[in-house]
Image (spheres, rainbow, N blue to C red):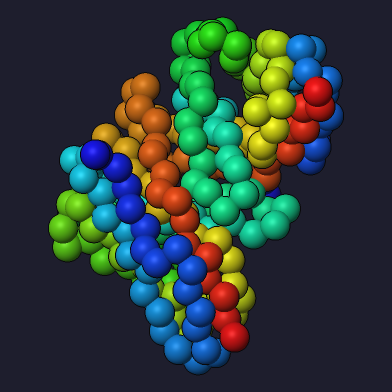
Amino acid sequence: DGGITQSPKYLFRKEGQNVTLSCEQNLNHDAMYWYRQDPGQGLRLIYYSQIVNDFQKGDIAEGYSVSREKKESFPLTVTSAQKNPTAFYLCASSIAPFAGNTEAFFGQGTRLTVV
Amino acid sequence: DQQVKQNSPSLSVQEGRISILNCDYTNSMFDYFLWYKKYPAEGPTFLISISSIKDKNEDGRFTVFLNKSAKHLSLHIVPSQPGDSAVYFCAASDAQAGTALIFGKGTTLSVSS
């Protein structure tokens, strides 16, 4: 089955630790995205990548880093510099960077909690 | 500054009636608009989209209307069903420039039977 997979579903991190969230897609999509959802805040864009080995900062990139070494994978690292990392993280992909009538497909999300 | 605004945090509707969810945007470069439905602890699922060259798009019970001059779009669900109860997000992008989707804060729809 084609789709976008995020792992793990739940993740706990101690303060001061870096943690990496996985996102893999087998849809052959060029573009991939990371969003963060907080209560009452909607989905806010962290980083996005339109092509392998290239990515751009979104609205709230501080304290996060990404890589795009393979078309299928777009891992997100939440660093210790991120002040409020507890949130629901969503990864998405699309055929092209929203050119024409293409929608983004989302994974099931990762709930990160700092303990 | 929010580029996509959903000013109603919640909406309650009776089963069988029409649900109307509204969305406003400020960026005149946006040319592609989408609605997503989301349940708690799950990823959003795509519902319906509209490009700026149209003013209406229909898919079954769901219709999206776009008023470019007012920078306003709305999602109509007719008839509403209890299974439609979820959070609905409006999203927009500048598809010509290939920008990422910008989302509103969402509207929680509750459909009672």
- Residue A4: x and y in percent read 32, 47
- Name the residue at 39% across, 31% down: A103
Residue A60 seen anywhere in this rendered image of the structure: no
* Horizontal and vertical percent position of residue B71: 66, 23
- Quadrant housing residue B69: top right
* Front residue of A80 and B3: A80
Q: Position of residue A31 (x, y in %)?
A: 29, 45
| Quarter assignment of residue A115 | bottom right
Q: Quadrant of residue A22?
A: bottom left
**Residue at position x 38%, y 39% from top?**
A105
Left or right: B4 as drawn, with respect to A105: right
Q: Is residue A1 visible?
A: yes
The front one of B92 and A95 is A95
Which residue is found at the position 33% from the left and 53% from the top?
A5
The number of callouts visible is 0
In the displayed structure, B70 sits above or below A47; it is above
Up/down of A26 relative to B47, above or below: below
Pinpoint residue B70: horizontal percent, then vertical percent. 70, 18
Q: Residue at x 49, y 35 (%)?
A: B45
Quadrant (top left/top right/bottom left/bottom right) for the N terminus of chain A: top left
Give left or right: position of A79 versus B107.
left
User: Considering only vertical position in the picture, is B97 above or below B79?
Assistant: below
User: Where B67 sits versus B1, above or below?
Assistant: above
> Considering depth in this image, is B2 or B81 the residue closer to the camera?
B81
Q: Residue furthest front?
A: B113
